[in-house]
Image: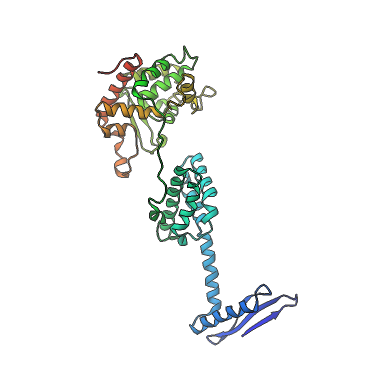
């Protein structure tokens, strides 16, 4: 049944003539001489074996072609891009771009074209080992987490059987956390004294000084301070309610305001209040934009504390001091707005321990006031 069909153009095609269920059909095996006689005979052998097993080789060829198409559509890269498009509205643009950039640079070249259902744990590990080899272990762990989310999405959309990253738990080198540079308790008074005269002695901006003072008193993240709006502050209840969309963990966060924080906000009200939705700390260039993220870092450098602390580091300083002075760790963690992984509990925990947190923040306000004067809280 094997023959070579010569076309008018001179091209030569390997064909096989066969009958299936009484109907004559032909099967194509490739172009000669790209496909040799030996290769054509092997393809004929496999086709005859299918016929002996009651299978139509042409139908199987169509199924194989369809499977290749499905595998291409469901390769890791395509599924990852689909997952990314599905999630992008929940991320900030810079974060979304960073995730895709990492996948394109470190994962797609290795396993991007592989059907997501066929990828083995060892294949993924080999790709991530290349990241480890560059000495960026933290990035390797982050990309592993991202790949895990892609596999979970593939499972949810019936493109994979399971998340293979679970097999790789413990396979990566551990990340040695450096933490944010932060001041020790003994170093805090010197910093606070300089901050108190930042606008007079160091020629700094008064708004920066007041913002940094409020950052220290509330120990929120710097982005939460810089993006604060006047309609978030309740002067009657002495509370700052940061909306979920501005919080890292996407949960409403209540900050009880101590006497010192209230005094700063009242002073700021005379400087920046325009309307309820205006920024408390607007950019010096435009009131429609928030204070630059480099403002606090620049102030730290001007006061002589570069590399000794960061704006974020005051969260660690506050946590250490409060823990050492007997405040409950659950209360401190809640005020730090560290994520609550239980989603049901998270929906209600913005007011958790609120009375204790209020007491703690009042204590902290007095502590900072005394530390600024070089004294200690008894």
Residue 247 in the image: above or below residue 359: below
Q: Residue at x 35, y 27 (%)?
A: 317
Residue 355 in the image: above or below residue 198: below
Residue 377 in the image: above or below residue 320: above
Query: Looking at this rendering, what residue extends furthest in the right direction?
Result: 9
Q: Quadrant of residue 230?
A: top left
Q: Position of residue 347 (x, y in %)?
A: 32, 40
Left or right, 336 with reference to 32:
left
Q: Residue at x 51, y 45 (%)?
A: 134
Question: How many numbered circles are shown?
Answer: 0
Query: Looking at this rendering, what residue extends furthest in the top direction?
Result: 200
**Quadrant of the image containing the N terminus:** bottom right
Residue 63, visible in the rendered structure: yes
Residue 90, visible in the rendered structure: no
- The residue closer to the viewer here, 229 or 95, is 95
Residue 263 in the image: above or below residue 112: above
Left or right, 121 with reference to 366:
right
Q: Residue at x 38, y 29 (%)?
A: 220
Q: Position of residue 268 (x, y in %)?
A: 42, 18
- The residue closer to the viewer here, 52 or 110, is 110
């Amino acid at each position: 049944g094997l023959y070579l069909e010569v076309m008018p153009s001179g091209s030569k095609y390997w064909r096989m003539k066969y009958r299936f269920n009484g109907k004559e059909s032909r099967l194509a095996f490739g172009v000669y001489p790209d496909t040799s006689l030996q290769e054509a005979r092997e393809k004929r052998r496999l086709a005859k074996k299918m016929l002996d097993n009651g299978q139509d080789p042409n139908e199987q060829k169509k199924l194989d072609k369809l499977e290749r198409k499905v595998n291409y559509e469901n390769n890791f890269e395509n599924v990852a891009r689909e997952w990314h498009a599905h999630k992008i509205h929940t991320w900030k643009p810079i974060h979304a771009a960073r995730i895709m950039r990492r996948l394109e640079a470190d994962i797609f070249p290795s396993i991007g074209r592989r059907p997501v259902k066929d990828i083995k744990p060892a294949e993924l590990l080999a790709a991530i080992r290349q990241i480890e080899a560059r000495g960026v272990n933290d990035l390797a762990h982050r990309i592993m987490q991202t790949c895990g989310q892609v596999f979970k999405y593939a499972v949810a959309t019936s493109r994979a059987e399971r998340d293979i990253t679970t097999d790789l738990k413990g396979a990566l080198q551990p990340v040695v956390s450096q933490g944010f540079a932060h001041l020790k308790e003994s170093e805090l008074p010197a910093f606070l004294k300089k901050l108190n005269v930042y606008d007079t002695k160091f020629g700094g901006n008064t708004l920066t000084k007041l913002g940094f003072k409020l950052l220290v008193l509330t120990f929120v993240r710097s982005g939460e301070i810089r993006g604060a709006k006047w309609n978030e502050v309740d002067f009657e209840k002495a509370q700052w309610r940061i909306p979920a969309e501005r919080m890292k963990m996407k949960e409403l966060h209540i900050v009880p305001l101590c006497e010192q924080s209230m005094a700063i906000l009242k002073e700021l009200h005379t400087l920046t209040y325009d309307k309820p939705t205006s920024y408390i700390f607007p950019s010096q260039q435009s009131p429609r934009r928030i204070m630059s993220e480099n403002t606090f870092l620049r102030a730290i450098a001007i006061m002589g504390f570069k590399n000794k602390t960061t704006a974020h580091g005051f969260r660690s300083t506050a946590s250490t001091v409060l823990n050492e002075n007997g405040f409950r760790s659950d209360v401190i963690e809640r005020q730090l707005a560290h994520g609550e992984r239980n989603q049901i509990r998270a929906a209600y925990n913005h007011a958790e321990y609120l009375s204790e947190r209020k007491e703690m923040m009042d204590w902290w306000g007095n502590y900072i006031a005394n530390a600024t004067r070089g004294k200690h809280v008894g």
